[in-house]
Image (cartoon, rainbow, N blue to C red):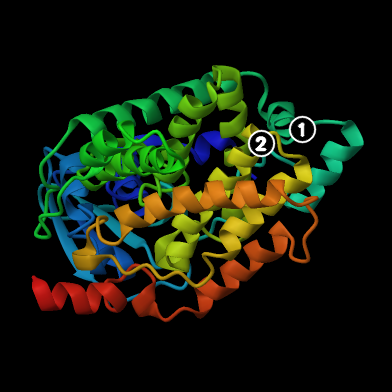
Amino acid sequence: MDSLKELFKIGNGPSSSHTMGPERAAKKFKAKNPDAVKFSVELYGSLALTGKGHLTDWIIKKTLLPAETQIIWKPEYVHPYHPNGMLFKAFDKDGKELDKWLVFSVGGGTIMDENEDRKGQAKVYPLGTMAEIKKWCNENHKELWEYVVEYEGEGIFDYLTEIWEAMEDAVKRGLETTGVLPGRLKYPRKAAVFYRKSKINPTKSGYIGRIFAYTLAVSEENGSGGRVVTAPTCGACGVVPGLLYAMREEYKLGNEDILKGLAIAGIIGNLIKENATISGAEGGCQAEVGSACAMAAGMACFLLGGSLDQIEYAAEMALEHHLGLTCDPVGGYVQVPCIERNAAGAARALESAIYSMYTDGKNRVTFDEVVQTMGATGRDLKEEYRETSLGGLAKFTFNAKC
């Protein structure tokens, strides 16, 4: 598995696959072809179907400036390597083709060539399943976060500090901003209202309300193209920081606990990325909000004092109960139902953590098994329900009301 630095990335929304990935690809291709005066980019499959709402064309054109860029939409073509394919071409002043590059945005802002192995990239971690990692932890009398430090080094905490600061900033910006999000949906920001209501509610409902508010704040920032952290994607970026921000307040958590919690969330996300997918175009929303919920649940269980078995159970339960969740963004925007799903996912993560704490951590279904099931379920989903805006809520709601 790769470093957590390739899972947690700081960048602008609204989509890690459709905005951050194409931006990284465009920067790389531009650097390789500094003398090009014109570019063309063919967008395939999901990138073409939801690219307008996800700002794919805008970010590519902006990145390749001052050269002129032609975007060619080919939604009918889905490359077998991954639904998010892009073909970059560079031209000189006479129109002669200088270079071309087929590249894929495979989730969480990661880009890969067609000949790259999807699994085991840049191996930082030698173990690739939860069962193997738990065995290592038990044999070495270590906690799950210590496995991260063993192979990333203590320096990973410096990186996770940057990640947490970026998450905090997104929460604060989102709480301070009102109005509507960009795009034809005219979706109203709700985080500030939720926060005001939660502050004057001293009951358990007020705590849940703050979780909702903080999660909405980050997700609304993402929906407006703001600066967020992929956790593991932009579309699911509100779950982990929303819950962690609220738990810090509720339990007076110190920075050391917060960073350890993020390390645990990260290794859980890494396992899902390695053994299934975190791409909505490949696995539906179960791969995005479902994965984020599993990460947040394992993190929360650790912060509540859970054992290694209970942490696994919490993560397994959170992902298990998102199996089959479709990705059907209305209008291609990362707004409806994405933002609300983040808030629901954060609450479910806490519930999964609390549930696991009432058990001995033993369960008939393992985390590794539910990850494999999620990957298989994603492959079985019809194309319409894998970030194409061709079915589900996207088809009926948008066509009826917009």
In the image, residue 281 sits, relative to residue 29, either above or below, namely: below
**Image quadrant occupied by the C terminus:** bottom left
Q: Is residue 305 left or right of residue 381?
A: right
> Which element carries disc 1, helix, strand or loop?
loop
Label 2, label 1: how far apart the Cα atoms are: 10 Å
Q: Position of residue 317 (x, y in %)?
A: 63, 59
> Which element carries disc 2, helix, strand or loop?
helix
Q: Is residue 26 visible?
A: no
Dots 2, 1 in contact, CB < 8 A: yes
Disc marking residue 143: 1
Amino acid type of the residue that numbered disc 1 sits on in the rendered structure: Glu
The numbered mark, 2 or 1, whose residue comes first in the sequence reads 1
Q: Which one is in front, 249 or 19? A: 249
Q: Position of residue 170 (x, y in %)?
A: 31, 31
Q: Residue at x 34, y 46 (%)?
A: 25
Q: Which one is in front, 351 or 37? A: 351
Disc marking residue 302: 2
Q: Position of residue 222 (x, y in %)?
A: 28, 43
